[in-house]
Amino acid sequence: MIFNTEHMYAPFVISSIADEDEVGKKVETDLLIQEFLNQHLKLSTYGQVLMGIAFVYIVTPPIDVIHHDEIDYRAKKKELFIQMRLPYDKVAAATEAEVWHMMAQKYLQTFQDKSLWKKLKGFDCEGFSKDVQRLFEEQGWINVVELV
Amino acid sequence: MNIVSKKHQFKLEPKPPRQAPHKSALLFIALCCILGFVAYWKGVDFLEMDDSGQPKLATSREKKMEQRLKRLQQCEQYVIRAKTSGYYPCYNCGKDTTIFLFGGEVWKYGVTIQGKNKRYRTWLEKTNLRYRVQFRGAIQECLLQETLKIYKYPLLPENLKRKPPLIRPPGNKNDL
């Protein structure tokens, strides 16, 4: 097998940075959201400026000062890298299903943020976030989230 | 026939009267001096003089050193695991460049003071690997943890079942 590190593993990659403990295990459902998005959405529908979106959740205790929220769009490589923090205490106290909802909500909110739309000229962010919202709502993963 | 060579005759031309150096030349020299001084000052801007005239580190340099020392106290030792079962790069598999890992199996142990993103950018997302923090502390403690984990890796059940087992995780190019 030849490794192609030019492109993302899949058009939609979802991962997480967490401690190797019970809280970390709760966000390993990231893989299921990744599979779901890859099954139901096609990036090319929304324009030709993106070939991959990587979304990484940070779920580390407050002692972690190394990892921060980050949005990095690389036009040449046509890839978008997003790193977003989920509140550690809430994740620690939540059930797996609740954490799943928090992850879905964070994903959607990030793409509803219009400051991101400005960065991604040529990508139909509005259409994409509407489709994601519709899909997540159909699955019952989110309540109706107001547009930011 | 005799050839009589003529002596070369020098013509003495009157020398032009000496002119006073032009103003622009003086300006140029002054500019060079200023630039030279700035370059010298820039080159040693990491030093300052204290009240008693003794050299000390410039405030900006001292701040940078303190930041660096602080970061060395905020280190983390991590493990990178396969997200799903599949083939992953292997640096310890002899002629083979890849290895089959089951989801959750160890690919690499490491240490960073920069965090996952600055260390790997999007490489982990491209190779389907997951980052998990195992230990936080000062860099010496993190390096100690990393060493223990790398050296003890051959004893992990996931490695013992391989024929032959690996000396260290597939993603660790060397012991340290």
Image (tube, rainbow, N blue to C red):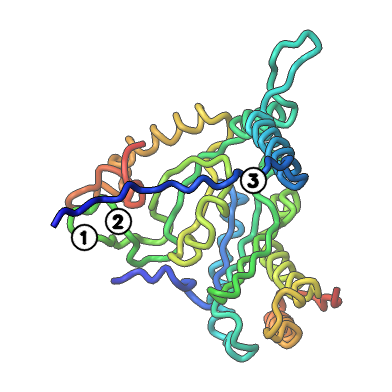
Q: Amino acid at mark 1?
A: Asp
Label 1 to label 3: alpha-carbon separation: 84 Å
Q: Amino acid at mark 2?
A: Cys
Query: Image height check: is B127 above or below B60?
Result: below
Residue A121 in view: yes
For mark 1, give the secondary structure.
loop
State the residue position of label 1: B96
Q: Estimate how packed mark 2 is, as few (under 14), some (14 to 19) or many (20 or more) residues with alpha carbons within 10 Å.
A: many
Q: Same chain for labels 1 and 2? Say yes or no.
A: yes
Chain ID at mark 2: B
Mark 1 and 3 residues: CB-CB less than 8 Å, in contact? no
Q: Estimate how packed mark 1 is, as few (under 14), some (14 to 19) or many (20 or more) residues with alpha carbons within 10 Å.
A: few
Q: Nearer the viewer, residue A140 or B92?
A: B92
Chain ID at mark 1: B
Is residue A114 toward the left or the right of residue B115 in the image?
right
Mark 1 and 2 residues: CB-CB less than 8 Å, in contact? yes
Label 2 to label 3: alpha-carbon separation: 81 Å
Residue A126: horizontal and vertical position, in percent? 76, 84
Residue B49: horizontal and vertical position, in percent? 74, 17
State the residue position of label 2: B90
Q: Same chain for labels 2 and 3? Say yes or no.
A: yes
Q: Nearer the viewer, residue B59 or B142?
A: B59
Answer with the quarter of the image where residue A82 lies.
bottom right
Where residue B16 is drawn, which disc sits there?
3
Residue B41: horizontal and vertical position, in percent? 69, 31
